[in-house]
Amino acid sequence: MTKPSRLKRRLLIAAGAVVGAVALVLGGTWIYINVFSGDAPDPFSLDPDGPTAESDGELATLDGTWSVGPDSEAGYRVDEVLNGLDNTVVGRTTDVSGEIVVESGVATSGEVVLDMTTVTTDSNSRDGQFRGPIMNTDEYPTATFTLAEPVSVAEVHDAPAPVTLTADGQLTLRDVTRDVRAELQMQRSGDTVQVAGSIPITFTDFDVEPPNLAFVRVEGDGLVEFLITFIQE
């Protein structure tokens, strides 16, 4: 075999090895996304045919102080490109606290606090990056939404289906506070009020740099999403 032929053969073997490695990586990523991790959880929503308050007489007023109940959940949703394949990442926690105050059918003040140290996805390594260099939860363990403008919730009192509302507020992440708008669905359910919704955010607005590495690129925009059950005090 001549030297050019040997060189050509070696080049073909090397190229085949590279192609095989790429196929192996992509195949492994596809299996991870579609088999081990499964589909990302759906966004939070309320059942339009869900239960409303049952009473033989007039429903109790919404006025008063409502605290976040134990069935509440919140977290984030973001799209990423993992080894060239599109993927949606959802992280959630049940460690949510806070309260809202309703006066004459209007939510006049409110605050919801999310424990960022317990937000988890389907990947321990991703969660480690989230708690470490991305969100630095040792120094900034919580995220807080504070209501900035009153919101009328009178329609929720006896509505037979979820009511769609918007709430202007301030979101604090990593000790950075920005004005945001939350898109909400609210529904009375027995002696509780359920609220599902999301807040679109741009990460760099909060001094958060989304990862952009050789194997993963996270989009610059995402959602804070939540399903909160409020209990009247």
Image (cartoon, rainbow, N blue to C red):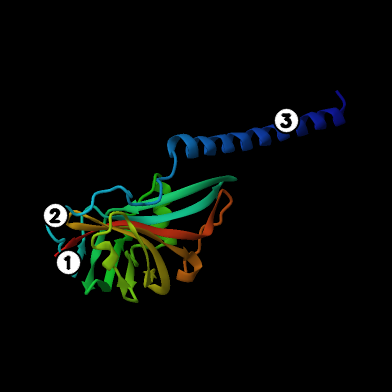
Above/below status of 21 relative to 115: above
User: Which residue is at a point 30% across and 62% down the rendered structure image?
Assistant: 114
Q: CA distance from mark 2 to mark 1?
A: 12 Å
Residue 191 in the image, given as x and y percentages of width and height: 17, 57
Residue tagged 2: 55
Type of amino acid at the residue the image marks with label 3? Ile
Residue 30 in the image, given as x and y percentages of width and height: 53, 37
Residue tagged 1: 61
Q: Earlier in the sequence, mark 2 or mark 1?
A: 2
Type of amino acid at the residue the image marks with label 1? Thr
Q: Residues within 10 Å of mark 2 (few under 14, many from 20)?
A: few
- Mark 2 or 1, which is nearer the eye? 2
User: Which residue is at a point 26% across and 55% down the rendered structure image?
Assistant: 72
The kind of secondary structure element at disc 1 is loop
Is residue 116 rendered to the left or right of residue 85?
left
Q: Which mark is residue 13?
A: 3
Type of amino acid at the residue the image marks with label 2? Ser
Question: Dots 2 and 1: beta carbons under 8 Å?
Answer: no
